Image (cartoon, rainbow, N blue to C red):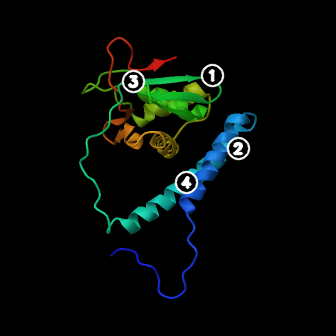
Amino acid sequence: MCPAENGGAKKPRVNVTRSLRDVIRDVAWLEKRRRKDSETTERALWELYQIEKALESRRSRTVTGCLPMPRDLPLPTLQDFQIVGAENGPAVVTLDNAKQVTLPRTLAVLAAILASDEGGSPDDLVAWKSFERVGELLKKRLGRSTFNHHALSQLLWRLRESLGNVAADGRRLVQSVPALGVRLRLQRRPGTGGLCAG
């Protein structure tokens, strides 16, 4: 049954999701401007993303019975993916020479790993990477402690949200299948390794 307004006095409506996104945007902006305390800022961003995820999950459970959900839509595929940025700072990611998004260093490194084309692939997209392999590469490139499955899942969710903010189907560009692992849905390019980085 669709949610209906309670009878009696009407309460003022607050768009919590929009307000939360505004705060996330502001914190992300602060992270770009102030690199000294980036771990604290990234932790705050992660907590905000967690709250947003919980709100969206609650909202989708409430609305699912009211609206038809599209199923079996074809997955989007990128033809071109470029990352340009400082070694220890944020990076600008360009999708198909059109849409751009600025990612914090951790997400930019994750995106580059997912877009890399190491190993074989069962289709014409870049190769799958196991969660363990992605965790190892993140640890090596970022010089941090081990990335467990939970931490990696949170980073993947944040990357999906960032891509979803610039492309209509952006969230679905990060593909994960338990039996295969995870990858970016990027067209494979023979001889280039699947990733164009400027």
Q: Amino acid at mark 2?
A: Thr
Estimate the spatial distance between the alpha carbons at disc 4 and disc 3, rounded to whole Å. 30 Å
- Asked whether the viewer can see residue 43, the reply is no
Q: Read off the residue under disc 1.
A: 87
Q: Which residue does the image show at 66% across and 46% down from the upper left?
A: 26
Mark earlier in primary sequence (2, 3): 2
Vertical side of 68 occupied by 43: above or below: above
Evaluate if marks 2 and 4 touch, with contact meaning CB atoms under 8 Å apart. no
How crowded is the residue under tag 3: few (<14 C-alpha within 10 Å), some, or many (20+)?
some
Of the numbered discs 1 and 3, the one sitting upstream in the chain is 3
Q: Nearer the viewer, mark 1 or mark 3?
A: 3
> Residue furthest toward the right?
36
Where is residue 195 drawn, in percent x and y? Answer: 42, 20
**Residue identified by numbered label 4:** 50
Q: Nearer the viewer, mark 4 or mark 3?
A: 3
Pointer 4 or 3: first along the chain: 4
